[in-house]
Image (cartoon, helix red, strand yellow):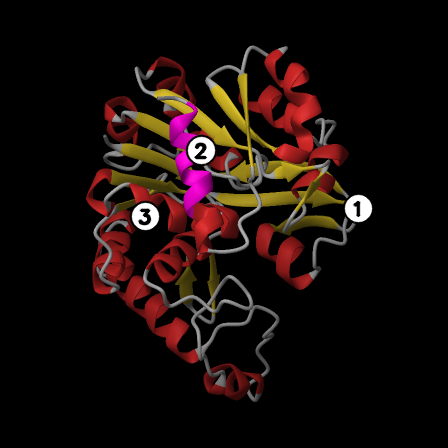
């Protein structure tokens, strides 16, 4: 069975750690958010793509959930000497990934081609696709003004009230080669436990992706990133609330109801199953908090089992 996963953020990478324990990597396609991509120090950084690569390669910094384990920061320290702002922390080994990506892009490669080469260099066998080869930037409207996602998330630590979110360049962004085919040909499509607004939202906004999810013959299952009305990591609950969405598992079902078959909700939210099913989405209850390897595998098995 081929499985296609819509992914963004640390939660998606952790879910994928469990999925590749039960499905061979060769049968997995990951479609990654690129709205968080940004240029730092002249280098193109693709945080969600790199988090998937580093996590599945066993190279991730386990304390942060991003970046490389055992990292040093000599280059970043040296850049401060020349007046660079260094609020976005890039380690020395991490910079090598971004330098390689940037070189390929400047030589005319697409982001898809660069991503495939990076995944292969880290020994991954799955197919990792950016949702688009065209530039998309997630912009967050706040009382402090318009912020790029990284300014909102990293520099200002999500402290600003979110008034609106928009995806610059989305009108001209086409799905990357293979994206729509991966959705159409999958046995199961999984929407990973990621922020519905800024991690999955950019994927769904690319022309053709949401329609592909509505029309695929595959079963479509999502894992709620909201447990007990809050997120384990990240600002999804506060962001959903400030944008007028319901910051619960039922609100996640509402956001995906036009294409979703099943939503996996946490045992803590069992009482919300009727509200989920009122949206036309079937609820499946499981332990969704991924503390270790066993829990990650069990969640992947629960998500696949809910639609088989």
- Label 2 sits on a secondary structure element that is helix
Relative image position of residue 158 (x, y in whole percent): 71, 53
Give the extent of the magenta segment: 297-306
Instruction: Identify the image quadrant of the N terminus.
Output: top left
Tally of marks: 3
Q: Earlier in the sequence, mark 2 or mark 1?
A: 1
- Category of crowding for the residue at label 2, using alpha-carbon neighbours closer than 10 angstroms: few (below 14), some (14–19), many (at least 20): some
Nearer to us in this view, 119 or 249? 249
Residue 174 position in % (x across, y down): 34, 32
Quadrant for residue 177, please give it: top left
What residue is rendered at 70% in x and 27% in y? Answer: 245
Q: Main secondary structure of the magenta part?
A: helix
Which badge, 3 or 1, is on the more N-terminal residue? 3
Q: Residue at x 79, y 46 (%)?
A: 143
Q: Is residue 163 left or right of residue 262?
A: right
State the CA–CA distance, disc 3 to disc 2.
13 Å
Q: CA distance from mark 3 to mark 1?
A: 44 Å
The Cα atoms of the two marked residues, 2 and 1, are separated by: 41 Å
Q: Is residue 35 left or right of residue 207?
A: right
Q: Secondary structure at mark 1?
A: loop
**From what the image shows, is residue 62 above or below residue 148?**
below
Characterize the local packing of mark 3: few (<14), some (14-19) or many (20 or more) Cα atoms within 10 angstroms.
Answer: some
Q: Which mark is residue 302?
A: 2
Determine if residue 260 is in view.
no
Residue that carries the numbered disc 3 in the rendered image = 21
> Which-is-in-front pick, marks 2 and 1?
2
**Residue drawn at point x = 50 percent, y = 45 percent:** 137
Q: Is residue 24 left or right of residue 246?
A: left
Q: Position of residue 283 (x, y in %)?
A: 55, 20
Q: Identify the mark nearer the N-term, 3 or 2.
A: 3
Mark 1 highlights which residue?
143
């Amino acid at each position: 069975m081929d499985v296609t996963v819509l992914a963004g953020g640390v939660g998606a990478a952790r879910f994928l750690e469990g999925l590749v324990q039960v499905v061979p990597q060769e049968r997995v396609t990951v479609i990654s958010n690129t709205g968080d991509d940004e240029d730092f120090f002249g280098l193109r950084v693709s945080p969600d793509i790199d988090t998937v690569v580093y996590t599945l390669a066993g190279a991730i910094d386990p304390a942060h959930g991003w970046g490389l384990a055992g990292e040093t920061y000599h280059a970043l320290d040296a850049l401060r000497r020349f007046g660079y702002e260094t609020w976005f922390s890039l380690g020395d080994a991490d910079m090598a990934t971004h330098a390689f990506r940037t070189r390929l892009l400047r030589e005319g490669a697409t982001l898809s081609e660069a991503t495939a080469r990076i995944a292969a260099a880290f020994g991954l066998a799955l197919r990792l696709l950016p949702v688009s080869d065209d530039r998309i930037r997630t912009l967050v409207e706040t009382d402090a003004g318009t912020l790029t996602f990284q300014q909102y998330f990293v520099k200002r630590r999500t402290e600003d009230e979110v008034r609106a979110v928009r995806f610059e360049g989305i009108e001209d962004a086409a799905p990357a080669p293979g994206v729509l085919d991966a959705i159409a040909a999958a046995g199961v499509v999984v929407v990973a436990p990621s922020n519905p607004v800024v991690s999955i939202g950019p994927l769904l906004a690319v022309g053709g992706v949401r329609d592909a999810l509505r029309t695929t013959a595959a079963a479509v299952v999502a894992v709620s990133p909201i447990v007990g009305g809050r997120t384990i990591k990240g600002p999804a609950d506060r962001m959903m609330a400030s944008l007028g969405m319901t910051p619960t598992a039922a609100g996640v079902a509402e956001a995906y109801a036009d294409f979703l078959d099943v939503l996996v909700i946490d045992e803590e939210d069992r009482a919300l199953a009727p509200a989920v099913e009122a949206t036309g989405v079937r609820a499946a209850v499981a332990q969704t908090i991924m503390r270790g390897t066993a829990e990650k595998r069990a969640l992947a098995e629960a998500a696949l089992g809910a639609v088989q």
